[in-house]
Every structure is written in C-alpha cells, then in structure tokens.
Image: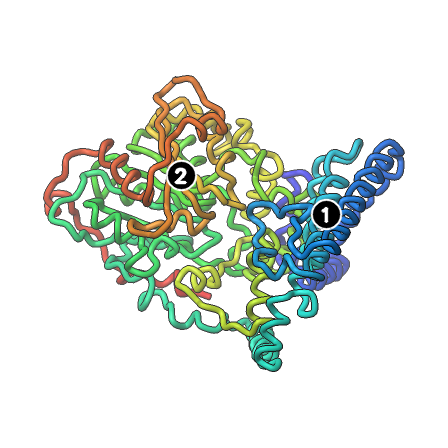
Amino acid sequence: MKPEQLPQLHRGAHDVTPVDALDRAMSVSIGRLTMGVSPIALWLAWFDWVAHLAASPGRQVELWGKGLRKALRLQSFLMNCARSEETEGCIDPLPQDRRFVGEAWKQWPFNLWSQSFLLSQQWWHAATTGPLGVTPENERQVQFFGRQILDMMAPTNFAWTNPEVLERTWAEGGANLLRGATYLADDLLRSATDAPPAGTEAFRPGHEVAITEGDVVYRNHLIELIRYRPSTGEVRPEPVLVVPAWIMKYYILDLSPKNSLIRWLVAQGFSVFVISWRNPTERDRDLALDDYRTQGVMAAMDVVARWSGQKVHATGYCLGGTLLAIAAAAMARDGDDRLATLSFFAAQTDFTEAGEIQLYLSEAQVAFLEEIMAERGVLEARQMAGAFRMLRSNDLLWSRMVTHYLLGQPDPVTDLMAWNADATRLPARMHSEYLRKLYLNNDLSEGRLKVEGHPVVLSDIRVPICLVGTERDHVAPWRSVYKATLAADSETTFILTNGGHNAGIISEPNHPNRHYRCATRPSMARWRDPERWFEETPVEDGSWWPAWARWLAARSGAPVAVSAASRDLPVLAPAPGRYVLER
C-alpha cells in the first residue's frame, strides 16, 4: 500500500461501499479475537518460512543434527539424574528468564520438563534464524510468534507441571485455585464491561497521582498545556517543556509525590511545562502525524517561548521524543532558534533496531491494523494494550496468570500499574502514518520525512542533546536510542540507566538498586559504537535524575527571582486539567 493511498483508509462509514463495510466489519471482528494480529500476515510469514525450509535440504540436515544433539544431551542428563539427586542441568535459561528459578525446578520430574522446554526453545530459535530466501520481515514474524507459542506452552503455566503451584495447592487444599477462579471471573467481567482493573481506583489523577500544583494555561483541540507552580524562591530563566507520548497519559512523569519527575524537577528550580494530550475519538480519525507536531509541540513551544522570553529546554519521552526530534529538525532547517537544549527519554529516531515492536510489525500487519482503525476511526486502547502484552508476554501475561489465577495471589496494584491501565486511543491516520513512515520505512533517519513539503534531517540540529536509554527497554532498545549520537552533529550526552522502558525513567533519588552511566561527546568528535561506549563508561550508583538536572543547569542562565521570571498566563483550570480524565 502506497502512502498516497492512506487517506482512503480513513473515510467515515457513510463514505464506503457496502462491500467495503462488510470487509471492514470482518477485519474488526477478527482483530477483536486476535488482539489486532492479522492471521493472514502470520500465515504468509509461516508459509514463506516453511516453503524455503522445505527447499533447503542442507538446512534440514543441519536442524536434524541439532535436534539429535539436544536429544542426546537430554538423555545424558536423565542418566545422571538416575545416578544422583544432585545433577547440573544440561542447559541454563537466558539471564532475563526467571521462570525456572528455585530449588524445586531441580527436582524430578520438574527438571525434566524445564530442561526439555529450554532445549526445545533453543532449537526453535535456531530453526527460525537465518533461513535462506525468507524475507527479513517474515523471518522476524516467525521468530516472534513462534516464541509466543513456546511461551504459552511453558511448564510454568500449568498447575500440574509447576512445582510451586502444586505445593501451594496441597498446602491450602485447593483454596488458591478457588481464589484464582474468582479473580479470573472478575477480570473477565471487567474486560467485558471496559471497567478498569481492580485496585486502580486507589490512584486517581488529581487525587492520589498527578497532584503537583500547576495550572492549565493553554488548550486547543489536541492538547492542554500545564504550567507547574514554582516551589523555590529562584528559578532558571529557561523553562523546560516536556512532550510525553500520546500513547500514554502524561502523568507517568507525575505519579505519586515520592516518584514524580515533574515535582522533583520543579524543586530543583526549573520552570516546567507539560503537554497533556487529548484522548482521541472517532471524530479525530483524520488527525495526521503533522497535526501532532503543529497543534502539539509547536503550539506549546509558542506559548512557552513567548511567556519566558528565553530559549526553551525541550524534553520528549518515548513517541513524544520522536515527534520532538521531527519538530526540532524542522525548526533548525527553517532557522528557528528558540531551543536551548533537547532531551530525549527512551525515544528513537532510527527504527532499524526497533526492539520487540519491529518483530511484531510487517506490511501485511500494518495493513490489517489500518482496516481495523478505518472502521472505528481510532485504534482502541485494548488492542494497543494487547499488543504490548505480547511484546512482554512472560512478564505481563503468563507470569501474572500463574501468580493471580493458579497461586491465588492478589495483584499488588501500584501507581505505575494503575497508570499503565489508563490507556488511550490513537487516531487512525496518525497511527498509520507513524507506523509506515517511521517503523516500516525509517524515513526520519534516512532523510525522507517531509515537513511542510520539504525533508528534515537530524544533522541540522546544533543545540546540545541529552539522550536517556534504559538497559532492559523492550520498546526502545538503548542501542537504538544511542544511534541518535551518530546522526547528530551537535554535542551529545548519553545516559544509560538500569530498568525498563518506564521503570528505568521513573527512577527517583533514593530508589534502591539504581545505577547509570553517563558520558558526553563534544560536537564533531569521533563516534564510539555502543558496545565500546558501554565498556569505557564507568557505572555511577543512584538515580540518573540529578545527572540530568546538572546537565540542564550547566546550559542554563543563573537563577533569578520567581517574580522576575514569571509573566501572566490565562489560567483555564487547575492541573491535571480535563483531557487527562477523558476515557
């Protein structure tokens, strides 16, 4: 499907033929059952793999040999088990795989099941990696969904093959399974009625979370702009404008007072503004990616720059960072010098290594999503949530099933978990353009993305840049985030912190077990590849927040009295505003 065909996908129901309507209704029905996964795209990928494997006798012999060697390893392991109770496994799980931790998994017969599963997993990885003739896109799809099937069949997921579940069931006389059944029934009812998960009512925006004092000072159809009230006598003259992702509610950065990045940044003497995106509805189906730039980033930039009379520290998180990079490149191209610095948190500008999402997406999959979105005008929150659960199925799906439904343990809802359940919809046109222009075509990194009719390139940006990556990010892998240092000709500072896509960013001072690396590359200096950067950059204990605040302060003017830095702005409502409450 060509980009010029995209507007056809977003016609309203009254503009389509009965045949189109029927086909769309079928796509929507299938999408609801498969959480947005195209079965046709999946079938095409599997057929491509099977057909090329069938025509590759050398590859078949190699895989038969691998299978035989693994069978012999398992046989040797079983023989050792028969001779001794203390037997080392024949294969270790991957470092991030915590499913088989515990002494019980070293006992018979659970060690047999875990070792058999891990050997099978290793064989399937070899079978789906590097087949001759298979397109890279289809290879990624086969790897991804093959792993989903294997994870579903893991012995940890069944009561009769999980020693912890068996032990708990024996100790409680099955009461854990009864509690789990109750939890399952409640979850099914909430899903059917679109009710939020149990426990999230304890974290309401404006009450328990998102309570840093501030005011909505600007509103248009797409955003509310929140200005936070200073908590210090003096502030830096240059304000900080934060652009969060529209795939999430902005208060990920303003959770509880103890872990609110916004509250902490205000306490460091910065004037902080944050964009709160509207939750789009069907009438917003034709909002384009560039509308998010103009009505979002640039509209907020106009207000903040005019209010301060100073240059602005612009900061983007996740997709908000990608959008900010596009806006900054366009500003640099057009001679707009209102930026003081740019900061990007877990944000990608090069999508050649886009992590787990890249494994999930394909041309056929995107076309299927477009048909689903064309029916409703938006991508529903539950479909997006389903896709992200698949990206981390072990952590977000199967481990929860075991602890919640089999062990009968209640979910410990935290502010971060409640925020994660407060999902948003995505306009059809914008999401289609984002997936095609960035994820599939990588237009931004390769200089093809056009803004106002002309391409933008990241190398035009000359202001200092700070990039923050997280070590276990499955959405924006840190090596992909690091690639922005290759594209930029300006001074770049890269900070790598432990944790994942969200928990690594929400890393307040005094948070236990936190560390980070930080190094600055001067403008036009020699580039270091990510592995060398990792090896040569020392580890610092603690949160990365103070390092970023020092970076901002070093590129700001001397603090001035709050009265000297403030100007009148219309107060439309107290924070957190109206848009963040929309469902």
Image quadrant assignment for residue 470: top left
Image quadrant assignment for residue 182: bottom right
Which type of secondary structure does the marked residue at label 1 adopt? helix
Give the crowd class for mark 1: few <14, some 14-19, many >=20 residues within 10 Å: many
* Mark 2 vs 1, N-terminal side: 1
Q: Amino acid at mark 2?
A: Val
Q: Decide: is 19 above or below 408.
A: above
Q: Which residue is mark 1?
A: 119
Q: Amino acid at mark 1?
A: Leu
Q: How is the image coloured?
A: rainbow
Q: Position of residue 96 (x, y in %)?
A: 55, 48
Residue that appears at 41% across and 45% down: 317
Q: Decide: is 435 above or below 518.
A: below
User: Count the marks: how many?
Assistant: 2
Mark 2 or mark 1, which is nearer to you? 1
Q: Which residue is mark 2?
A: 468
Which type of secondary structure does the marked residue at label 2 adopt? strand
* Quadrant of the drawing holding the N terminus: top right
- In the image: residue 167, left or right of residue 59: left
- In the image: residue 502, left or right of residue 217: right
Q: Position of residue 391 (x, y in %)?
A: 59, 51
Give the crowd class for mark 2: few <14, some 14-19, many >=20 residues within 10 Å: many
- In the image: residue 345, left or right of residue 107: left
Can the viewer see residue 38?
Answer: no
Q: Pointer 2 and pointer 1: residues touching (CB < 8 Å)? A: no
Can the viewer see residue 140?
Answer: yes
Measure how far apart labels 2 and 1 are at the Cα level. Answer: 36 Å
Q: Position of residue 541 (x, y in %)?
A: 33, 41
